[in-house]
Amino acid sequence: MFLLLPPWGKVGKGVIKLYRKEKNNIMEQIDFTKGNGLVPVVIQDNNTLQVLMVGYMNEEALEKTRKEKKVTFFSRSKNRLWTKGETSGNYLHIKEVLMDCDNDSILIKVNPAGSVCHTGSTSCFGDESAKGFIYELEHIINQRIKNNTKESYTNQLYKKGINKVAQKVGEEAIELIIESKDTNIDLFRNEAADLLYHLIILLKTKGVNLESIEEVLKGRHRK
């Protein structure tokens, strides 16, 4: 079980959630004694929820992480603090921090600035699965719109308004239905992908995100 830690302030629009407890100081909550001054830290992609890497922090590394909103570890091999991305520029920007129920390990959800593993892979565990990418796609769509990227088809469609976006979703839905009656699975998958992509844009125009739709589905499952 992981518990939400006290807020470290806003990081973009991501607000690190509040862990309501008498002691509101993160440094007082984490137990460094069990690991001889170190605690294990699991790094997870905030969008795809993919586990990216595992490192260790001492109190100084955790405090530096808290202040800079970028993950800093304690390197056991180099015997010094090490900010992930200090050489490559592939920083791990913090979105949420959680602590386990024993107060001796940490989970940090991040938006990575690039590849996490030194091999160039997304994850140090070598898992390049597409599972969870739909949330990364939602993040990309949101960024294109937020940054008003002029050459972006996503942004151009969004700016045309809900009628045009809804029309496009309807067109893609019809194309998927037509393709479902054929035997070409690759074309069917591509049409399904087109529909999902445009549906995310429609959700954006309504101020709704994928997670809120999941909440509806989860609520139905409980009934």
Image: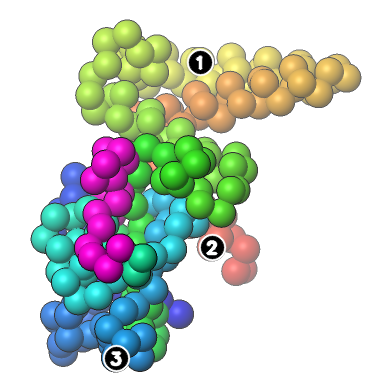
Q: Which mark is residue 33?
A: 3
Task: Please state which of residues 121 and 147 is positioned toward the viewer in this rendering.
Answer: 121
Which residue, given by chain and number where applicable, does mark 1 sit on?
168
Q: Residues within 10 Å of mark 2 (few under 14, many from 20)?
A: few
Image coordinates for residue 70, horizontal then vertical, percent: 22, 53
Check if mark 3's residue and mark 1's residue have beta carbons within 8 Å.
no
| Residue kind at label 3, given as amino acid type | Thr
- Which stretch appears magenta? 78-95
Magenta stretch encompasses residue 42: no
Q: Is residue 22 above or below residue 208?
A: below
Q: CA distance from mark 1 to mark 2?
A: 29 Å
Secondary-structure class at tag 2: helix
Q: Which mark is residue 219?
A: 2
Residue 16 in sight here: no
Counting residues from the start of the chain, the first of labels 3 and 2 encountered is 3
Quarter of the rendering occupied by the C terminus: bottom right
Residue at 46%, 53% in the rendered image: 52
Check if mark 1's residue and mark 2's residue have beta carbons within 8 Å.
no
The answer to whether 18 appears left or right of 134 in the picture is left
The count of marks equals 3
Q: CA distance from mark 3 to mark 1?
A: 58 Å
Counting residues from the start of the chain, the first of labels 1 and 2 encountered is 1
- Which mark is in front, 3 or 1? 3
* Image quarter of residue 78: bottom left
Residue at 43%, 63% in the rendered image: 54
Image coordinates for residue 10, horizontal then vertical, percent: 15, 54
| Residue kind at label 1, given as amino acid type | Lys
Task: Please state which of residues 158 and 124 is positioned toward the viewer in this rendering.
Answer: 124
Residue 114 in sight here: yes
| Residue kind at label 2, given as amino acid type | Gly
- Which mark is in front, 3 or 2? 3
Secondary-structure class at tag 1: helix
